[in-house]
Structure formats: C-alpha cells, structure tokens
C-alpha cells in the first residue's frame, strides 16, 4: 500500500503492457504527453480528433476504474489500510473529495448492475455521461427488465439517436413496463427541495426537481443568466446564481407572493362605446351587466384581475355633423327614421373652415371621451359593478402584433425541440425563430421556412457571418459556411434495424 502523496515508481514503459502496472504507466505517459504538448500549433482537425479520442479514453477510464474498484471492494482491500469503506480509502489515498469518491463507488456498483453499459464503456462506444443517464432510466424499471432495456437504449445510441430520443424511448419503456406505484406518496415522491443555511447566512440548495419544475427553472436561468456584455466576467455558475436571485427579486417585487401565489390569470373585458350605450339603464345610469363576449374557463375569475377595455373609432358621419353644427349649417338636427344614430350628413369638409373645425374636434375628442370625468369612464363606472367599475381608462387599447403567429411558433418548437444548427442543443427558451429564406427575398412565414436558432447561431453565425441553413423534409438541417468549404449536418433518427 502507498502512503498518501507518495507517487508510485515509474517502470520503463514497454510497447505493449504486460501487467496492470505497465498499463497504468503507459496511460499516464500518453496523457502526460498531451497535457504538455503545444496544441495551439496543431491543426483544428487534429485537435478535434484529439478531443473525440480523449472522450473515448474517458469512457475507458470509467470502465477500468469501476472494474478495479469493484475487485478492490470485494477483496476488502480498504480494510487492509484500516479504512471502513472504499470511499474513505479513496479520499485518503487518492486525495479526492467526498463527492468524487462517492461517484467512483457509484460507478463500480452501477456497472455491476448494468454489465451491458460497462461493456459499451470498455469498448469506447458511449460516453460516461450518456451511460450514466441510460443506467438511471433503466433502473426505474422492474428488475427483470434492466438488461433488455439497457441493450435497446445502447443499440439506439450506437445507431445515432441523440440523448432526447433516448429519453423519450426510456419514458415509453417506463409507461409500458412499470406497474402501479405501491407507495402512497400522493404523487409527490418525485420531488423535494432543501435549503440549508450555512456560515454568515449563506445557503446551499439540494433536491430533486420534476421535469416541469426543471423546465421552468431552466427557462428562468437562461433568460436572466446571459452575459451582460464583454465586461461581464462572471462564470456560468455565478450568472445562474444571480439569475435565480433576480427572478426571486422580481417575483417579490411584483407583489404576487402574499395573496396571489403566482397565479398568472388575467381576464380582459373588451367592449365598445356603443355596447356601453346599449346597456339597459344607460340613459339614467342604472346598474346593469349585459356585456357579451368569450367566456373565461370555469374558475378563472376566482383569482383573476379583470381589466375592462373600452374601444371605439372615429365615425366620419358624426364628425361631419358636429362640424356642420359648429358652423351653424342646416341639416345638423336629429336623424330621420331608418337612418343611423347620427344620420347621413351631406356636409363634408368642403371649406378651409370645415377642415379646421374637424381638426379641432379630433384634437379634443380624447378629452371628451376618456379620463375620469370623460364619457366612457362615466358610463363604465355607472353601469359596471365590481372591479370593472374602476375609474380612468384610455378609450382604445391596441393589441401587440407578432411577426410570427403563436401557433407557428409552437409548431416550430415542437418540431425542432432545440437550436437546429448542427451540433447545438440550446433549449427553445434560449432560441429565436428564424426565417430560412428572408422575408425580404420572398420567404414566407410558414412552417417549412422557419426554424429554431439560439441567439448566437441566429444573430452571429447566420446574420453576421453568413452561414446558410437548409431545412430538409425529415426536419434535419444542413449548415454551409460562408466560404462554402465546410458543410455540417444534424443527425437524423437512427436507422431502422434490419
């Protein structure tokens, strides 16, 4: 046994290892070469090959360490050094943290329970992180289904499926194979959160989040945790922390916590000035509630803020009659039977005086029809009970118009699921919808001409650098560099087994 901090003696490295010690020495020598090499002088293609190879080495390392550690635990090797567990021995002898030691022990047990995953790691066919996810998913199935589920997911990964495809496949396995939950946990067994206070009132958060909670938190962090500019030197973890603090600050500042519990429901009651006039009792301001419109869902009004919006438009006939009345011209009396409320006026702005009168009326129309003492507010507060009777609203409220309709935005999100640029996995919350063929060149706002791109690939790679995207019928994409020398392809679904 070695004492902590004492490096083992390094024997001469043979061409082919003939023992475990030789293999470790060769691995150390190879990695030491890479760690000290001047990789900046290596072409980018060689750097890419090196990175892919190192990831396979990481898989091999995980499998090798798990196998050695499993044998070490089975033989009680840690007890020979007076340690009560393999984890304690690892912390003492290899100088790793408690979490790292627990992770190494977990891999030894994980591979023992999932030998197919261990074989894939030992062959360098799957990354350690993907193998961990697959083992976590299949562990939730009945014990007799683990091996088959591992084989199916590993084969799908080898066939080209991405991690989200594997997650969907694992979810379908759970739906078909898992029996009823025997635990009477009320449906809350999949979630917990603990906030521990540490020194100087600092905190540490631990827990398991549901997919819905994870998606909501991910959206908040991605929206509020972006770099503020080139001067922003915070790390990703620091920006995520500050984003969570900012989200909580905004929630508290909105006044939603004490009485509304974050309920986002809002009912907007739209009506025109004519509808207000036509309510029963409008002539003598008697209370009435006769407005008609789309009904809210049952229960929506229980904790909703109701916002009445009174709208209207300029009636040129009325405007002409008012102008004629101010000029003292005939024909400005009450409308004849069968005509509109204000009748048909033959008097238009035929003279400069008429044009000035029309402009004067329009300039002061808002003063007449809006404000706490205006006509619209007077009728609304006198006829509508409850919160809809509050004072002072503008006569007209416009509606925000989107360049891309909501239904198309949702369809693009469901289809793409993440940034469509090959190799990018940014979630929809961090993406924008991009017109593949610009609208200025006749591109339509249609599903086949829209795709999700993260802000970097949309604003910089495409619009600043000039990369060209092609969307294929199977929803895969091809990206071509501005000089046309590089072509990147996104992965399609795995090929169907023969």
Image: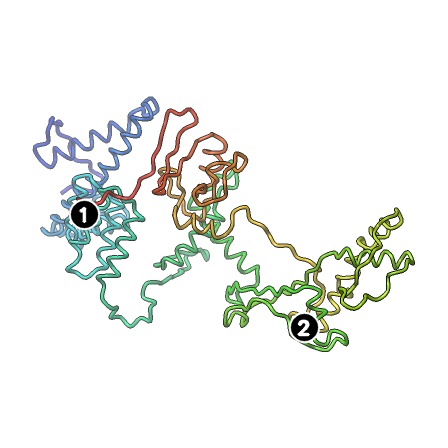
* Residue placed furthest toward the left: 18
Task: Give the Cα separation between the discs numbered 2 and 1.
Answer: 68 Å
Location of residue 342 with respect to 241 vertically, above or below? below
Label 2 secondary element? loop
**Residue under circle 2?**
384
Numbered disc 1: secondary structure: helix
Which one is earlier in the sequence, the residue at label 2 or at label 1? 1
Q: Position of residue 332 (x, y in %)?
A: 86, 61
Image quarter in which the N terminus is found: top left
- Quadrant assignment for the C terminus: top left
Q: Nearer the viewer, residue 492 or 352?
A: 352
The answer to the question of whether label 2 and label 1 lie on touching residues, with beta carbons closer than 8 A, is: no
**Relative side of 307 to 366, left or right:** left
In the image shown, does 430 or 27 lie closer to the viewer? Answer: 430
Task: Measuring from the top left, give residue 148's x and y in whole percent.
Answer: 16, 54
Mark 2 residue crowding within 10 angstroms, few (<14) / some (14–19) / many (20+):
many
* x, y percent for residue 327: 90, 56
Above or below, 337 relative to 462: below
Q: Quadrant of residue 478?
A: top left
Residue sitting at x 29%, y 72%: 184
Q: Residue at x 51, y 50 (%)?
A: 405
């Amino acid at each position: 046994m070695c004492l902590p901090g004492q490096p083992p003696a390094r024997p001469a490295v043979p061409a082919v290892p003939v023992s475990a010690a030789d293999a470790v020495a060769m691995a150390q020598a190879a990695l030491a070469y890479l760690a000290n090499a001047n990789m900046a002088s290596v072409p980018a293609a060689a750097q890419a090959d090196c990175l892919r190879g190192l990831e396979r080495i990481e898989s091999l390392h995980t499998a090798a360490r798990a196998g050695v550690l499993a044998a070490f635990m089975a033989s009680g090797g840690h007890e020979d050094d007076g340690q009560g567990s393999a984890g304690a021995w690892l912390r003492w002898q290899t100088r790793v943290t408690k979490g790292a030691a627990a992770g190494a022990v977990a891999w030894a047990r994980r591979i023992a329970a999932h030998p197919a995953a261990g074989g894939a790691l030992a062959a360098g066919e799957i990354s350690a992180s993907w193998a961990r996810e697959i083992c976590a998913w299949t562990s939730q199935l009945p014990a007799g289904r683990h091996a088959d589920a591992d084989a199916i997911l590993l084969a799908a990964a080898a066939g080209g499926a991405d991690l989200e495809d594997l997650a969907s496949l694992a979810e379908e396995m759970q739906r078909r194979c898992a029996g009823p939950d025997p635990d009477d946990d009320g449906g809350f067994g999949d979630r917990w959160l603990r906030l521990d206070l540490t020194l100087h009132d600092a905190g540490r958060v631990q827990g398991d989040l549901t997919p819905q909670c994870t998606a909501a938190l991910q959206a908040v962090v991605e929206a509020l945790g972006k770099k503020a500019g080139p001067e922003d030197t915070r790390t990703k973890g620091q920006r995520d922390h500050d984003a969570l603090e900012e989200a909580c600050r905004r929630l508290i500042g909105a006044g939603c916590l004490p009485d509304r519990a974050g309920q986002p429901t809002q009912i907007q009651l739209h009506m025109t000035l004519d509808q207000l006039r036509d309510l029963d009792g409008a002539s003598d301001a008697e209370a009435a509630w006769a407005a008609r419109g789309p009904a809210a869902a049952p229960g929506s009004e229980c904790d909703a803020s109701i916002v009445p919006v009174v709208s209207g438009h300029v009636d040129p006939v009325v405007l002409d009659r008012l102008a004629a009345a101010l000029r003292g011209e005939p024909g400005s009396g009450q409308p004849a039977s069968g005509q509109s409320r204000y009748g048909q006026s033959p008097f238009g702005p035929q003279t400069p005086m008429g044009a000035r009168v029309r402009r004067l009326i329009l300039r002061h129309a808002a003063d007449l029809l809006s404000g706490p003492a205006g006509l619209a507010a007077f009728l609304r507060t006198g006829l509508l009970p409850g919160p809809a009777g509050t004072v002072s609203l503008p006569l007209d409220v416009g509606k925000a118009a989107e360049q891309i309709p909501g239904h198309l935005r949702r369809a693009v999100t469901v289809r793409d699921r993440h940034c469509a640029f090959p190799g990018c996995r940014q979630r929809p919350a961090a993406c924008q919808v991009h017109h593949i063929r610009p609208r200025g060149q006749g591109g339509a706002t249609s599903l086949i001409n829209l795709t999700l791109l993260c802000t970097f690939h949309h604003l910089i790679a495409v619009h600043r650098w000039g990369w060209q995207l092609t969307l294929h019928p199977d929803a895969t994409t091809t990206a071509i560099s501005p000089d046309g020398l590089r072509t990147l392809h996104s992965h399609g679904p795995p090929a169907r087994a023969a």
